[in-house]
Amino acid sequence: IENYMLPILIISAYLIGSISMAIIICKILDLPDPRTQGSNNPGATNVLRIGGKKAAAATLLGDGLKGVIPVVIGQYLGFGTEELALIALGAFLGHVYPVFFGFKGGKGVATFIGSLLALNYFVGLAFVATWLFVAKVLKISSLSALIATLLTPLYLYLITNNIEATAIVGLICIWIFYTHRSNIKRMLSGEEDAIKS
């Protein structure tokens, strides 16, 4: 693989990540801008509040695909796990700091899950399984995402034994805790919304 291909792919992943599905889907469905409603966060959870389950599912799928597509392209071009983790980082940063939307994006979990599923299917499934289990038991969406995030570097290392990729994914996981700082404050004060069954 040519040396210049990896930086091009990381930048492309960032640009793909910068496409805010929440804002686009709300515009298509004639819903309010998610940055002005609810938690003001352009992500699937806030779209669920504004526009219901179908709009939220479309947002979740779109945000997930932003992580899948660049990593799959990287695999097709023959990059190794650590390079694919850098591509995943590019997509994640695009979602959190989108160049097309004034660098104010979502929290990055859906894009991270998409890139994990493409990077290593078992790690991605382990994240989803952890999220679902914790969500069922504790009924707090953000806490489920954070516990699954916390365990992901461990899953990746146990499955791939790749310390470089684990370090890069670990960096994304630390960033996800940073993007959830308002949720963490609400959880500590007992104000975080429970998942409605």
Image (cartoon, rainbow, N blue to C red):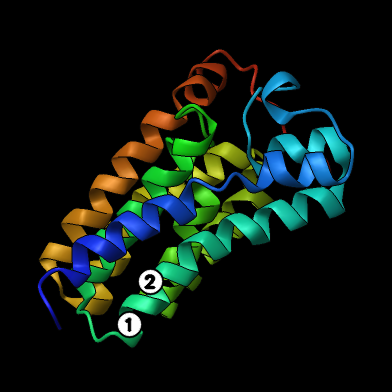
Helix, strand or loop at label 1? It is helix
Can residue 120 be spotted in the picture? no
Q: Is residue 59 left or right of residue 41?
A: right
Q: Is residue 52 left or right of residue 22?
A: right
- Categorize mark 2 by other alpha carbons within 10 Å: few (<14), some (14-19), many (20+): many
Helix, strand or loop at label 2? It is helix
- Residue at (55% x, 53% y) in the render: 110
Q: Position of residue 153 (x, y in %)?
A: 27, 58
- Categorize mark 1 by other alpha carbons within 10 Å: few (<14), some (14-19), many (20+): some
Q: Position of residue 176 (x, y in %)?
A: 40, 39
Tell me the CA gap for discs 2 and 1: 6 Å
Q: Is residue 37 left or right of residue 90?
A: right
**Residue 173, above or below 58:** above
Residue type at tag 2 = Val
Which residue has dot 2 on it?
Answer: 71
- Quadrant of residue 165 in the image? bottom left
Which numbered tag is attached to residue 75? 1
Q: Position of residue 63 (x, y in %)?
A: 59, 55
Along the line of sight, the residue nearer the viewer: 133 or 61: 61
Along the line of sight, the residue nearer the viewer: 9 or 57: 9
Look at the numbered discs 2 and 1 and tell me whether their residues touch, using CB distance below 8 Å. Answer: yes
- Residue at (50% x, 64% y) in the render: 114
- Residue at (56% x, 65% y) in the render: 65
Which numbered tag is attached to residue 197? none
Q: Position of residue 78 (x, y in %)?
A: 24, 86
